[in-house]
């Protein structure tokens, strides 16, 4: 609950205390003053009475009532004190204000009773004669140890009150001035106490807004100065810590952001805490979805199971996950628990490794091994079959024997070709992967001419003209042997799949930055459906035709690898029935 402002708590309390004390002091002072005044008047009355008593006791005047009355009137003329002389019977024999003959017997007055008993009499009461409150003092007149009368002096209480009232007004006025002054002083003091606290509050608000670099300066007492100093130190420390934390965080973000592995963190309720850029990409989620549950975000039961297992079981967890997106994605996941300061699991971190390419390579390898085995098995089976036939008696028939041995020789050649091609392929791959293919600047024309002349006899045999077009000065950084092999493979194919008379043309030219070698024939062409696959190992369009022509299905795969080893590529354009055009494209320098 928000309390009142400190100023409004201090100021009214101070003011109330001041006013109450002022009022108490004023009242006490007024009363004391009144009492003091009364005492003074009482003493004055007694001393005046004493003077008259002395005079009356020493002379004989008391016997003459008229004389006594005259004396009273004379003495009382110039003062406000009333003087009365009374005989022992209570009869008034002299009075400064009234005619004694008209006055009642005074023997019942309390001060007179006391004086007649030989004591000093005092009283305050209404005067039945004057009808106003009066203060009285009475002294006995004694002669020879006998009371012979009473001298009484009296003063009006109203005149005392009147005199005191003036002083009351002065006290009240002074009180008012003091109250006003103390109100102002209290205001200043309250401000002085509350202002530094308000400034401190504003300073704390500035810190709370995060402006921790600011320094507070509040003028005030030693305690306030100490508090300000402590707050400034606290803010500076906080600022330093926040900076350290945010720089650590930035570092962490930079590291996580640059990782190729996907990293995601979840809390103990399987809600996504954070995920790096690679993780977002792999899982196809957006960063705004932090805080949502994994079940909702990633609809992959295997990953959900792995996260649950990481959170519930001790030790790291490992597993493989397949994400069915446009294409299947294979991820290797490692899960580990995140421990908090008390060494209790507060969540889990999952690291995802995209192993799709590895998987593809592994599949390719498996496929390749299967293909190789199959391709090798065919000639070996044929060899074994014919050898057995020969052993079973065909040897005895020279005609059959010659035919079978011929076939055996052909199959052995085929086996040899396949093994040669495989060895070549693995050589290219190994050299390219391990040390990089050795490329040297060389003129291109001699390389192409050598390939063409190697196949010239075969072309002549099929009556196919072989044309070569290449500028003399064309050169590039190449591996001459392998480039020649690639051209031989392409020309060999062109001759194999062309009818006699249809020329095969080998051409090399410069395309800005690139060297392009094309081998073009006007042969049978390749159907569009096969174009994307003919560069795969062992892929052939027509198996029996390829085999009949001595093909291994590895020729174009070798060309592709040679082009790649030159940081280039190979492509094909073909129209069935019209011919094909293969192009090797490698960087000119
Ligand atoms: P092969 O040893 O069977 O020739 P390649 O890898 O060299 O194997 O070629 C793969 C397939 O591509 C061949 O089987 C053939 O069907 C097709 N092919 C290659 N070159 C040509 C071409 N110049 N004309 C038509 N078809 C071709």
Image (cartoon, helix red, strand yellow):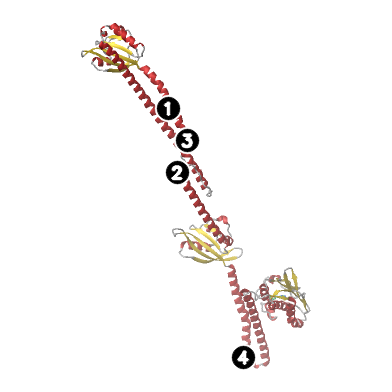
Alpha carbon distance from label 2 to label 1:
34 Å
Count residues near mark 4 (Cα–Cα under 10 Å), then give few for <14, some for 14-19, many for 20+. few
Mark 4 sits near ligand 1, with its Cβ under 8 Å away: no
Q: Is residue 528 left or right of residue 273?
A: right
CB under 8 Å between discs 2 and 4: no
Say which mark, if any, is on residue 222: 2
Q: Position of residue 500 (x, y in %)?
A: 77, 79
Mark 1 residue element: helix
| Of callouts 3 and 1, the N-terminal one | 1
Name which of mark 2 and mark 4 comes first in the sequence: 2
Horizontal and vertical percent for residue 459? 75, 81
Q: Which residue is mark 4?
A: 391
586 or 390: nearer the eye? 586
Gap between marks 4 and 1 measured at Cα? 147 Å
Mark 2 or 1: in front is: 2
Badge 4 element: helix
Say which of 202 and 493 sits in front. 202
The secondary element bearing badge 2 is classed as: helix
- Using a 10 Å C-alpha cutoff, classify the residue at mark 1 as few (fewer than 14 neighbours), some (14 to 19) or many (20 or more): some
Q: Which residue has dot 1 on it?
A: 175
Q: Which x, y percent locates residue 464? A: 77, 80
């Amino acid at each position: 609950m928000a309390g009142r402002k400190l100023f409004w708590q201090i100021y009214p309390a101070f003011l109330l205390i001041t006013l109450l004390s002022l009022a108490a002091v004023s009242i006490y002072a007024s009363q004391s003053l009144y009492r003091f005044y009364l005492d003074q008047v009482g003493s004055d009355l007694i001393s005046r009475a004493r003077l008259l008593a002395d005079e009356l006791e020493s002379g004989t005047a008391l016997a003459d009532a008229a004389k006594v009355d005259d004396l009273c009137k004379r003495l009382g003329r110039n003062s406000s004190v009333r003087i009365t002389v009374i005989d022992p019977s209570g009869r008034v024999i002299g009075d400064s204000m009234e005619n004694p003959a008209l006055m009642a017997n005074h023997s019942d007055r309390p001060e007179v009773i006391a004086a007649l008993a030989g004591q000093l009499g005092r009283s305050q009461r209404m005067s039945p004669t004057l009808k106003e409150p009066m203060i009285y003092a009475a002294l006995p007149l004694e002669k020879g140890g006998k009371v012979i009368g009473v001298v009484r002096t009296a003063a009006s209480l109203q005149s005392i009150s009147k005199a005191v009232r003036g002083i009351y007004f002065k006290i009240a006025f002074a009180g008012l001035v003091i109250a006003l002054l103390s109100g102002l002083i209290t205001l200043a003091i309250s401000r002085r106490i509350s202002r530094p606290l308000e400034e401190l509050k504003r300073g704390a608000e500035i810190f709370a807004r995060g402006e921790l670099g600011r320094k507070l300066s509040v003028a005030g007492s030693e305690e306030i100065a100490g508090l300000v100093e402590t707050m400034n130190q606290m803010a500076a420390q906080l600022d330093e810590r926040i900076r350290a934390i945010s720089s650590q965080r930035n570092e962490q973000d930079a590291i996580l952001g640059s990782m190729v592995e996907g990293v995601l963190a979840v809390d103990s309720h399987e809600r996504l805490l954070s995920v790096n850029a690679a993780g977002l990409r792999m899982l196809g989620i957006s960063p705004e979805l932090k805080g949502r549950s994994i079940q909702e975000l990633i609809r992959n039961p295997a990953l959900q199971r792995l996260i649950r297992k990481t959170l519930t079981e001790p030790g790291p967890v490992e597993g493989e996950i397949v994400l069915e997106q446009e294409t299947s994605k294979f991820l290797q996941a490692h899960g580990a628990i995140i421990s908090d300061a008390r060494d209790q699991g507060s969540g889990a971190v999952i690291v995802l490794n995209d192993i799709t390419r590895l998987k593809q390579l592994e599949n390719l390898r498996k496929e390749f091994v299967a293909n190789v085995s199959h391709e090798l098995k065919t000639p070996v089976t044929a060899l074994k079959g014919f050898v057995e036939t020969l052993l079973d008696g065909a040897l005895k028939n020279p005609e059959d024997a010659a035919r079978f041995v011929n076939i055996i020789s052909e199959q052995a050649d085929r086996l040899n070709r396949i093994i040669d091609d495989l060895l070549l392929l693995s050589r290219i791959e190994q050299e390219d992967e391990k040390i990089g293919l050795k490329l040297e600047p060389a003129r291109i024309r001699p390389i192409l001419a050598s390939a063409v002349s190697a196949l010239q006899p075969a072309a002549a045999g099929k009556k196919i003209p072989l044309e070569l077009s290449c500028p003399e000065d064309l050169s590039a950084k190449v591996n001459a042997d392998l480039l020649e092999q690639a051209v031989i493979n392409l020309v060999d194919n062109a001759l194999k799949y062309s009818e006699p008379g249809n020329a095969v043309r080998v051409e090399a030219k410069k395309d800005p930055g690139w060297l392009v070698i094309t081998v073009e024939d006007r042969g049978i062409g390749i159907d569009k459906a096969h174009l994307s696959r003919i560069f795969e190992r062992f892929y052939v369009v027509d198996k029996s035709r390829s085999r009949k022509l001595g093909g291994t299905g590895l020729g174009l795969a070798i060309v592709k690898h040679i082009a790649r080893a030159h940081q280039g590529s190979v492509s094909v354009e073909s129209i069935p029935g019209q011919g094909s055009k293969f192009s090797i494209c490698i960087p000119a320098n």
